[in-house]
Amino acid sequence: MRTLSTSVLLVACFMMMLVAWGGSEPAAAQDHTRVKNPAVPGEQAPPAAPGQNNFGMPILSPGAGGQKPPIRAPRPEPQIRTVSLDDISMSDPFIYPDEKSRTYYLTGTGGRLYKSKDLQTWTGPYSIIDLKGTWMEGNFVAAAEIHHIGDKYYLAGTWNDHSHLIENIPRRYNVPTNQTQLLVADTPGGPYKPLVPEYEFCLGPGNWDIIDGTLYQEDGTTYMVFVHEWTQIIDGTMAYMPLSKDLTRRTAEPTTIFRASEAPWSKEMNSIGEATFGLKMPGWVTDGPQLFRTQTGKLGMLWSSWGEHRYAQGVAYSASGSIKGPWVQETEAFKGDNSGHGMLFRTFEGKLLFIIHHSEASGPRKPQIWNVDDSGDKLVLKDRYRS
């Protein structure tokens, strides 16, 4: 028995040494599937009052027996045409400038794609996503954005499945599956297909309500920075998780960066009379992260929440210059006039610009491009960009 125990001990030591010598990226032990036993729907928050400010349509929950809600008819294929930016309605706009083709690619919530050579006239919308064989097929995509890493193009987008609940929070919300996933293509114009084509795959923890993921690279590691939804945890957070070299798995569980309530300009939803999905849910919202560095090397993060004038764009800065923070919130919103989910990009001439969506009263969300100055330690908003 002593010989057997010694052998087992030697094998265990050898395996530990293999892990230590095997490089900086140990195998991930995380579960990468959806919740296997969906939650049963229950009583939700009180309904919004008639005429109350509200974001989003009421969500149809699955029935008590788990049956799916009625399926909406698929959107018809759009007619391709050339329009000005002012003619486009889109939430969460994102522009990827492709140096090779000298073309700007615009996408966002809905996942359609527009192309432009001058940032003024845009041709589209093109269908660029193929989700066959995954739980995302037929489901709506939010906050799509394009990243170029290595010789591939990656589309990060958030898909939800309201027929697959991960949690029921009594008298608050039936929390659906929400996940930011990565698609891959050989060109920025697609077609984009799931990087991991397994039917039940989730890049983040399946029992987390995850939206608005973006990619950020630091010291040789690619991170997904994302929102852990306030609808599930009341005080929404920004979080990050490191990804494997091929971006197909997370290599550690998520780390919280900050909470929405840490920003003085971010307001609790019920306190400003805002309802969501037709429900009066209390809490603080996090939305739309993008990390950037100023010309002085200061690391910042654009992110959005709700403030005194409805949707608002904010900025936080890392005191350490690393994603690990600590993160310090600006006292005032960067742009607080029912605008938000902004992203930075550079023109082919090297000019830094800022695209954001803005809504007049209860009108549609429209992309706008603004000039910004990043020459100092903090980003400064200038005037509207006119090409």
Image: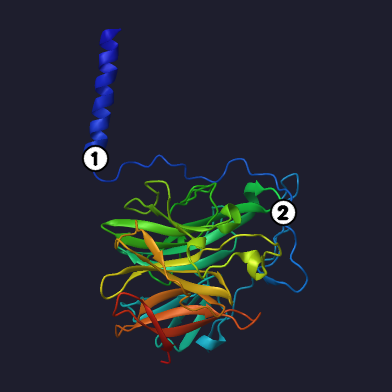
**For residue 6, above or below residue 88:** above
Coordinates of residue 237 in the picture (x, y in percent):
49, 57
Q: Amino acid at mark 2?
A: Gln
Q: Is residue 255 above or below residue 377?
A: above
Q: Residue furthest bottom?
A: 386
Front-lying residue, 33 or 307: 307
Residue 273 is situated, as x and y percent measured from the top left of the image, at 67, 69
Q: Nearer the viewer, residue 41 or 107?
A: 41
Residue type of the residue flagged with mark 1 = Gly
Write the residue at 48% across / 62% down: 262
Q: Quadrant of residue 376?
A: bottom left
State how far apart marks 1 and 2 are (Cα): 49 Å
Q: Is residue 63 visible?
A: yes
Q: Which residue carries the number 1 mark?
A: 22
The answer to whether residue 194 of the structure is visible from this angle is no
Instruction: Read off the residue under disc 2.
Output: 44
Check disc 2: other Cα within 10 Å, few if <14, some if 14-19, many if 20+: some
Q: Earlier in the sequence, mark 1 or mark 2?
A: 1
The residue depicted at 26 percent of the width and 16 percent of the height is 7
Q: Crowding near pointer 1: few (<14 within 10 Å), some, many (20+)?
A: few
